[in-house]
Image: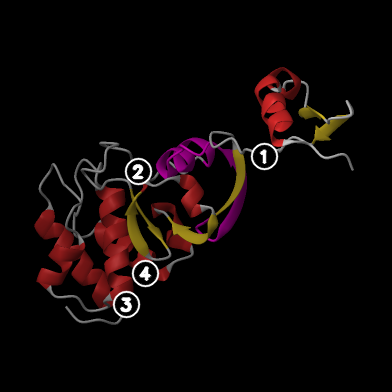
Amino acid sequence: MPRVSRRTFMKASVAGAAIVGVGGLGLKSTSGALLQIAPQTTTSLDAFATRAITLIVNGQSYTLTVEPRDMLVNVLRENLNLIGTKRPCNRMECGGCTVLIDNVPVYSCTYLVVRAGQGQNILTVEGGKTDNVLNAVQQAWVPADASQCGYCQAGRVMAATALLKSNSNPTVPEIQAGLEGILCRCGTYLNVIQAVQAAAQSLGGSQ
């Protein structure tokens, strides 16, 4: 193979921009033969492209196409028509959008749906038919008159469900701590505590 001197290489590199544009770097050897250096190729992914995910919601599997920026609350309400999950503030301040992901309460208004599409189990307020703890909370809610306008109700029910899943017999301070961050404009906090106590009792805990 003909040798390419350093001087020839540097000259070809400076002048090679025009040749690179047609797919590679061309160098001329001392004998005049054209040497081809294959261009490097890179594969880039579009971070904003839509993608298919599978959500497990209330025990059912849903496959759908979403944007990476889509929030869980929007997909639940607008794509799956599960409108029980509310969107009161949409900025992680009131807690009315709370759902459970693997039994952990999260604010769905700021939770990217692609994070939930990795095999996690999502439980919304509509899941009372398949979840006995959620069903017990819902059954205790009405007799205790725990809601008035109902805007915070779904989030508060889900937070109470998460609490009873981790603590079957919570004290009043533990109930208050478990529901902290779910704001109620109507001020039915005492009734909510009574509802959680009644749900705990029905599940085998004591008041």
177 lies left or right of 58: left
C-alpha gap between disc 2 and disc 1 = 31 Å
Whether residue 77 appears in magenta in the rendering, the answer is: yes
Q: 62 or 110: which is nearer to us?
A: 110
Residue 155's x, y, as percent? 29, 51
Q: What is the three-letter code of the residue carrying label 4?
A: Val
Marking on residue 43 = 1
Quick one: label 1 or label 4, which is nearer the N terminus?
Answer: 1
Q: What is the three-letter code of the residue carrying label 2?
A: Thr
Q: Give the number of marks.
A: 4
Label 3 environment density (alpha carbons within 10 Å; few <14, some 14–19, many ≥20): some
Residue 184's x, y, as percent? 16, 46
Kindly indicate whether the residue at mark 4 contacts the one at mark 3 (C-beta within 8 angstroms). yes
Kindly indicate whether the residue at mark 3 contacts the one at mark 1 (C-beta within 8 angstroms). no
Label 4 environment density (alpha carbons within 10 Å; few <14, some 14–19, many ≥20): many
Which of pointers 1 and 3 indicates the residue nearer the eye?
A: 1
Q: Residue at x 32, y 46 (%)?
A: 97
Quick one: label 3 or label 2, which is nearer the N terminus?
Answer: 2
Quick one: label 1 or label 3, which is nearer the N terminus?
Answer: 1
Circle 3 residue: 203
Residue 154's x, y, as percent? 31, 50
Range covered by the magenta-colored residues: 56-80
Circle 4 residue: 133
Marking on residue 145 = none
Quick one: label 4 or label 2, which is nearer the N terminus?
Answer: 2
